[in-house]
Image (cartoon, rainbow, N blue to C red):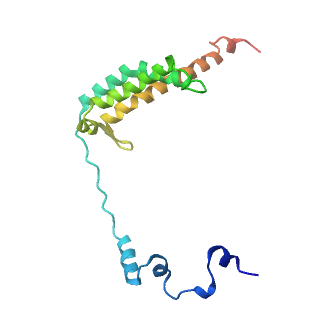
């Protein structure tokens, strides 16, 4: 009976080498190994990304645009929720609404220069910097949040005493 390791992996006990596993596996001598391992003890200097300047007025302007975009983004989110099994089978109103929402987000991002994208609206203790780019990217999320909150509120209202079927005693 043969050793399964010898058959599968080509390893046998006769072939053992007396050199260190580091030299055998990686081709480094012991002194190079010590040099590499000692370099791991040195702290790595992390560069902090350059912070943009504080621009509260620009951030407020972007929030106004975000609020203006809510109807288009909400329509796009509703269309995405109502999409059929094969969304590419037909090009209908759902696709137009989704394309309009995506186009609006791309438009808002393209309106900002690279320097403006780094500008900060605020710096919060746990969250960190809120940049103008963050606000521009958030518009799609606000539309989806509004669409899902609307569905939740409608379901809650239907099940409450104010709603139709929730008010009927059992």
In this picture, is 106 found above or below 47? Answer: above
- Which sits in the foreground, 29 or 165? 29
Residue at image position (41%, 82%) is: 29
In this picture, is 17 found above or below 42? Answer: below
Left or right position of 142 against 54:
right
In the rendered image, which quarter contains the N terminus?
bottom right
Residue 70 picture quarter: top left
* Residue 137, percent from left and from top: 38, 33
* Residue 54, percent from left and from top: 23, 37
Left or right position of 109 against 169:
left
In this picture, is 20 found above or below 50? Answer: below
Residue at image position (55%, 25%) is: 81
- Which sits in the foreground, 159 or 85? 85
* Residue 48, percent from left and from top: 29, 52
Residue at image position (49%, 86%) is: 19
Left or right position of 165 against 44:
right
- Which sits in the foreground, 45 or 13? 13
Tally the numbered discs. Answer: 0
* Residue 156, percent from left and from top: 61, 20
Residue at image position (33%, 66%) is: 43
Residue 57 picture quarter: top left
- Which sits in the foreground, 113 or 48? 113
In this picture, is 96 found above or below 22? Answer: above
In the rendered image, which quarter contains the C terminus?
top right
């Amino acid at each position: 009976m043969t050793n399964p390791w010898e058959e599968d992996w080509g390893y046998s006990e006769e072939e053992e080498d007396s050199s260190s596993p580091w030299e055998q596996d990686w081709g480094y001598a012991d002194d190079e190994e010590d040099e590499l391992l000692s370099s791991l003890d040195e702290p790595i200097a992390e560069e902090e990304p350059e912070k943009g300047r504080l621009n509260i007025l620009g951030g407020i302007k972007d929030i106004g645009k975000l609020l203006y975009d809510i109807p288009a983004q909400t329509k796009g989110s509703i269309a995405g929720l109502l999409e059929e099994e094969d969304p590419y089978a037909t090009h209908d109103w759902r696709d137009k609404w989704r394309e309009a929402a995506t186009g609006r987000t791309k438009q808002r991002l393209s309106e900002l220069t690279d320097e403006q994208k780094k500008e900060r609206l605020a710096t919060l203790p746990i969250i960190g910097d809120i940049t103008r780019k963050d606000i521009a990217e958030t518009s799609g999320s606000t539309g989806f949040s509004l669409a899902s909150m609307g569905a939740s509120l409608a379901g809650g209202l239907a099940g409450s005493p104010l709603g139709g079927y929730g008010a009927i005693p059992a």
